[in-house]
Image (cartoon, grey):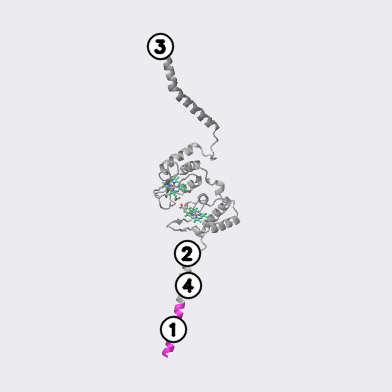
Amino acid sequence: MRLLTRKISARLSARRRSRFAAPAVLIVGLLASGGLYAALAPANADNSTDDAATIAKGRALFAVSCSSCHGLNAEGILTEKGGNYGPSLIGVGAAAVDFQVGTGRMPMAQPGSQAARKRPVFNDDEVAALAAYVASLGPGPAIPTKAETDTSDLSNEEMVQGGEFFRTNCTACHNFAGKGGALPKGKQAPPLTGVSAKHLIEAMLTGPQQMPVFSDGVLSMKDKREIVAYLKKNEDSPDYGGFSLGGIGPVSEGMFAWLVGIGGLVGAGIWITSQTARIKKKGNAA
Ligand code: HEC
Ligand code: HEC
């Protein structure tokens, strides 16, 4: 009897060993390697100072308001034709989110058309959380600091220099007075009046839609600030009086010159020739 129980218990323990030993070893191994990884893994490569709670809040907002077009992990969604329903946002940086959401362009109402400036849907904290979340996905341009958006330290010469930069880089699309202009395919470059310094710099850093990115190699942060100073100065200065022709640039002013100037000359020419013709006729009759 004793022998029998000993035999049974020996067999039981052997079976137990075979049944549970492997999973137990596996679990211990996983725990050990996980622990080792946690201890030895390099610190997060992203050097942003955004805390985990802000990023988590941004991720939650993103899932509700943005993921339908940009994908649950901001990886972008392709349409059936291969175009973008919403592009990937990995690496666009906090500046792009702050610009797009801060100017009310995003969340876009419907895919397809150019996202227009409108009243922002999110408050400042929510925009900051969304920006922190997207920034955590990959390095990209950061939101300009207070010191970068404040242009009061720039001299008059620097502001004039900004005007030069503006005329070289921006007027092709935004018009020489910054009043905006039409682009091919029904798109438009918006007017630059009433745009905050922060959004001006962010637009240059991130190049929304057809606008090129003006990286620091093209226009340094100081150059960008000089452009901002120039545009803000223009905004403050009153009209110089007289008839402004709408101030919308060469088209309206060219039209004015054409109709009133050349049109007047043509009218005078016709009048003069009609006078000579009549004189001739009179001469013939005489
Ligand atoms: C209805 C679809 C749609 C929704 C919803 C939407 N987006 Fe977009 N988003 C787009 C499209 C399309 C573009 C590209 C065209 C453009 O820039 O206007 C874009 C562009 C962007 C860009 C610019 C990317 C770049 O390369 O600079 C950012 C940033 C962005 N979206 C953020 C967001 C955030 C944040 C939300 C949520 C609050 C959001 N979007 C919601 C469709 C959408
Ligand atoms: C190739 C044409 C092009 C050039 C050059 C260009 N832009 Fe733009 N810009 C655009 C377009 C198109 C948009 C509208 C993007 C959108 O709505 O998503 C835009 C938008 C902007 C906005 C956003 C305005 C708003 O209403 O929120 C700012 C600010 C801006 N541009 C500044 C500049 C500055 C400063 C320069 C020169 C350094 C410049 N742009 C050069 C085409 C251009």
Q: CA distance from mark 1 to mark 3?
A: 140 Å
Read off the magenta span: 269-286
Q: Which residue has dot 2 on it?
A: 251
Q: Which residue has dot 3 on it?
A: 5
Indicate the position of residue 23 as horizontal and vertical percent values.
45, 25
Q: Relative to the observer, which residue lies in front, 108 or 12?
A: 12
Magenta span includes 184: no
Q: Earlier in the sequence, mark 4 or mark 2?
A: 2
Q: Which residue has dot 1 on it?
A: 277
Q: CA distance from mark 4 to mark 3?
A: 120 Å
Q: Which residue has dot 4 on it?
A: 262
Question: For the residue carrying disc 3, how many other residues have a C-alpha within 10 Å: few (<14), some (14-19), or many (20+)?
Answer: few
Q: CA distance from mark 1 to mark 2?
A: 37 Å
**Quadrant of res 15:** top left
Which kind of residue does numbered mark 1 sit on?
Answer: Ala
Which kind of residue does numbered mark 2 sit on?
Answer: Val
Which kind of residue does numbered mark 4 sit on?
Answer: Ile
Callout 4: helix, strand or loop? Answer: helix
Does the Cβ of the disc 3 residue fall within 8 Å of ligand 1? no
Residue 283 in sight here: yes
Q: Residue at horizontal 55%, vertical 54%?
A: 227
